Image: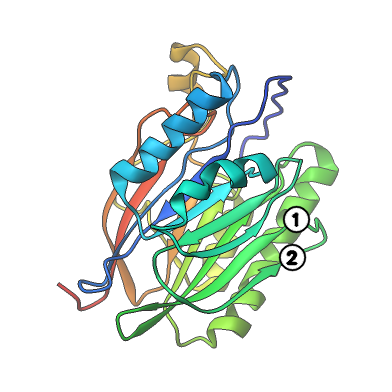
């Protein structure tokens, strides 16, 4: 079964969509999470407070924020003391993205996989004495033939990018809204060609989109699908995975604890 394309429009103001990821440098464990863009959104200040509260409550070490514009980056200056390592490409459309990290970057760059020309963030972090390659990405929605082709093309471009940057030897964490369900052929191909593991395996179906912001609670319960993902390399293992609370977005946060294989 393939993925289900959706088109949802709103004239409301945008709410930033974090993907939070964290690690404890002493234990080698990570947590990441992802709130998303809102539909019938609360007031901007209220939405910002919810996102900030979510970040502070779960206290991840890596935070990937999606649909980030310049105003959101300014609002999030209060995070700079906790997350001093920052890589960002804010935009006025739905594809601004930012990475906030407690972990120092050894290298970091903005990359543009595929023909869609929307930014992704690539960073090499130091976790204790271990290296970790992190890719935060946001694929185009598979709306219409053109959107479907661009989404697939973007996902196809990720495996060679990671192979080149991680050299096949470094642990890898891939985070983001892939606009693809786990049953989508493009997603399955991504997993197969990267050699990464879907963190959702063994945790059941954990839908992240859409929330009742766009649909009634009953419809959201019936129609929600998991399109926000965390993929990990085989030298990492998932110790916990959960869906977070509603933060005024059309996506729910995805929270995942990850550890180096063999760590306690």
User: For the residues marked 1 and 2, what is the alpha-carbon distance in whole angstroms?
Assistant: 6 Å
From what the image shows, is residue 190 above or below residue 183?
below
Q: Residue drawn 30% across and 67% down?
A: 237
Quarter of the image where the N terminus is located: top right
Sequence-first tag of 1 and 2: 2
Q: Which numbered marker is on residue 138?
A: none
Is disc 2 placed on a helix, strand or loop?
loop
Q: In this view, does 203 lie to the left or right of 134?
A: left
Please tell me which residue is depicted at 60% across the width and 45% down the height of the picture: 74
Which of 140/109 is in front?
109
Residue 118: assigned label: 1
Q: Total marks drawn?
A: 2
Q: Does the residue at mark 1 contact the one at mark 2 (Cβ under 8 Å)?
A: yes
Residue 20 in percent (x, y) is at 43, 51
Q: Give the left or right position of residue 46, taking residue 179 as reference.
A: left
Question: Residue under circle 2?
Answer: 112
Q: Where does the image place residue 69, in percent across and percent down from the top left?
A: 68, 43
Q: Quadrant of the C terminus?
A: bottom left
Query: Residue 66 at what x, y percent from top left?
Result: 59, 46
């Amino acid at each position: 079964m393939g993925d289900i394309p959706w088109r949802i429009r709103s004239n409301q103001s945008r709410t930033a969509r974090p993907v939070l990821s964290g690690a404890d440098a002493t234990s080698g464990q990570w947590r990441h999470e992802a709130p998303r863009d809102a539909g019938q959104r609360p007031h901007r200040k209220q939405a910002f407070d919810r996102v900030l509260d979510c970040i502070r409550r779960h206290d991840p070490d890596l935070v990937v924020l999606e649909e980030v514009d310049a105003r959101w980056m300014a609002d999030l200056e209060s995070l700079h003391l906790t997350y001093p390592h920052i890589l960002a490409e804010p935009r006025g459309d739905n594809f601004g993205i930012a990475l906030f990290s407690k972990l120092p970057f050894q290298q970091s760059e903005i990359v543009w996989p595929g023909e869609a020309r929307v930014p992704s963030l690539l960073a090499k972090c130091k976790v204790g004495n271990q290296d970790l390659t992190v890719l935060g990405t946001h694929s185009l929605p598979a709306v219409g033939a053109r959107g479907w082709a661009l989404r697939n093309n973007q996902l196809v471009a990720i495996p060679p990018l990671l192979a080149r940057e991680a050299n096949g030897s470094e642990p890898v964490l891939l985070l983001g809204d892939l606009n693809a369900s786990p049953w989508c052929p493009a997603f399955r191909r991504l997993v197969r060609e990267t050699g990464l593991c879907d963190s959702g395996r063994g945790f059941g179906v954990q839908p992240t989109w859409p929330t009742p912001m766009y649909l009634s609670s009953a419809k959201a319960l019936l129609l929600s699908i998991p399109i926000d993902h965390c993929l990990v390399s085989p030298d990492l293992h998932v110790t916990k995975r959960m869906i977070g609370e509603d933060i005024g977005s059309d996506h729910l946060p995805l929270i995942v604890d990850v550890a180096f294989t063999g760590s306690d």
